[in-house]
Amino acid sequence: MKHLLLAATLSLCSLTAQAVEIAVTAEEVHTRITQQDSNVLFVDVRDPVEIMFVGFTDAVHTNVPYLLVDRRAWDEQRGTYQVNQNPRFLDEIRAELNKRDLDENTEIITLCRSGSERGEPSAAFLRANGFPNARYVIAGFQGAALKEGPQAGMRLQNGWQNSDLPWSPKMNPQKMYRP
């Protein structure tokens, strides 16, 4: 029984270490990408329409959506347009790495709005498909929503925007996704 408990504990510690390793703060990302010898690919994985309404940081190298909104299909259960995984995501990430003479061992950091719906899943997907150093920005671009107070529900804590890092309401057309 002791051996089984020890094995389970070690397994849980390994999973916890892996979960921590995949997540980085916005400040850590900014430090990494501003270093002169930085071998990082920083990718905004949001749909360009979301970027248009929420804001953008020119610190990213490119925009390659992990999920794309299909405006031809309606999701009755969610009451929104259907969202599908970008079928070219891996190919487009490889192309971005090739443009910069980088390989699959490069640190790839993904950024979405909140870190949870596309950021973390896109990093996990990249890791599962041969990119062992994929990570995501904790709390994403906009940050986490406040739980209490008069501004409850508003994304006013942490994340890229709320960390005094460079961003703009304008998009950079040279970096935006164009299928």
Image: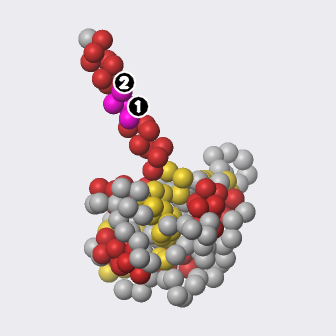
Q: Quadrant of the C terminus?
A: bottom left
> Residue 41 or 175: which is nearer the viewer?
41
Question: Image point 50% across, 66% down: which residue?
Answer: 40
Mark 2: amino acid: Thr
Relative to 52, is 63 on the left or the right? left
Categorize mark 1 by other alpha carbons within 10 Å: few (<14), some (14-19), many (20+).
few
Separation of residues labelled 2 and 1 (CA atoms) = 6 Å
Q: Quadrant of the N terminus?
A: top left
Report the colour scheme.
secondary structure
Q: Amino acid at mark 1?
A: Cys
Residue placed under numbered mark 2 in the picture: 9
Q: Nearer the viewer, residue 135 or 71?
A: 135
Asked if 25 appears above or below 93 in the picture, the reply is: above
Q: Quadrant of residue 129?
A: bottom left
Q: Which residues are magenta?
A: 9-14
Q: Which residue is mark 1?
A: 13
Residue 116 x, y percent position in the rendering: 47, 55
> Residue at coordinates 29% horizontally, 56% vertically from top-left?
128
At numbered mark 1, what does the secondary structure look like: helix, strand or loop?
helix
Name the spot of residue 140 as percent of width and height, x first.
55, 60
Q: Are marks 2 and 1 in contact (CB under 8 Å)?
A: yes
Residue 43 in magenta stretch: no
Chief secondary structure of the magenta portion: helix
Picture coordinates of residue 57, whole percent (x, y): 61, 73
